[in-house]
Amino acid sequence: MTSVKICGLTTPETLDAALAGGAAFVGAVIFPKSPRHLDPLHAAALFERARGRAGVVAVTVDADDALLTEIALILKPDLLQLHGAETPARAEQVRTLTGAGIIKALPIRVHEDFAEAEVWDAFVDHLMFDAKPPEGSDLPGGVGARFDWTLLADRAFRHPWFVAGGLNPGNVAEAITISGAPAVDVSSGVETAPGVKDSALIAAFLEAARSA
Ligand SMILES: O=C(O)c1ccccc1N[C@@H]1O[C@H](COP(=O)(O)O)[C@@H](O)[C@H]1O
């Protein structure tokens, strides 16, 4: 069965909807430019209810050691999702510094973008393939952009990997079928406005992924 991560949760109600619907991972975005940003203290208070029920993921973008240490001490995520221009060497430092597992998000538009994945595969717990954001975007993810899922067909990686970018309850089953993804991740596709998650859309997404 496909694992689902619901990302950018900011309220107890929508986090509960994700947990009740069987999300395997739930994500807090810790990146001030995002409409879903939570500081580590607020994220820790909110995500306490998820502990032991789903993997807690902290999404960061080129975070420095001070912020990563704060996240590790206060939120204590199971996994850190590196969604910036981090290198494999930096990922190793982050793992040592925080003790958390690593998800590395890679921006994809064309076949050639997968060259990086081969390098990264040995350094991570999970790869995540997300669409390249539109030119000039303030955010490297969470913008609802999708890529050609056929680029992923028949590819194999060491660990279960995620497809992300532009997924929603109406297209997630097709994305899973075409890409063969063992895991999917969604943010804006289960929102009614940027940063405003919707419990019914979260439930519909989880159901659609389950039925794929
Ligand atoms: O969601 C955000 O605001 C965000 C900010 C910075 C980095 C990553 C972010 N989100 C990640 O992007 C994917 C794809 O988003 P979407 O579903 O296309 O809106 C999302 O699943 C998050 O992991």
Image: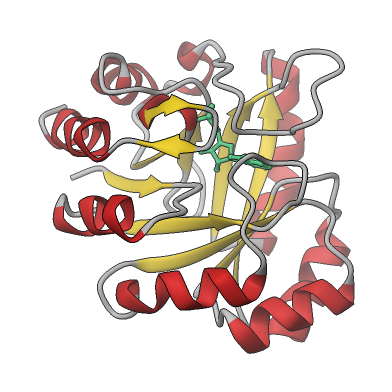
Q: Position of residue 129 (x, y in %)?
A: 58, 34
Q: Up-down: is 25 above or below 43?
A: above
- Where residue 108 sits, quadrant-wise, is top right
Tell me, what colour scheme is on the image?
Answer: secondary structure
User: Does residue 149 lie above or below 209 as drawn?
Assistant: above
Residue 59 in the image: x percent, y percent? 62, 55
Q: Residue at x 47, y 33 (%)?
A: 163
Q: Could you say where residue 17 lies in the image, as x and y percent from the top left?
A: 22, 51
Q: Quadrant of ligand 1?
A: top right
In the rendered image, the vertical position of residue 16 relative to residue 67, given as above or below:
above
The image quadrant where one finds the N terminus is top left
Residue 52, picture quadrant = bottom left
* Residue for point 62% across, 85% down: 74
206 or 109: which is nearer to us? Answer: 206
**On the picture, is 201 further left or further right than 66?**
left
Tell me what residue is drawn at x 86 percent, y 54 percent: 87
The quadrant where residue 139 appears: top right
Residue 167 vs 74, above or below: the answer is above
Residue 204 screen position, x and y as percent:
18, 30
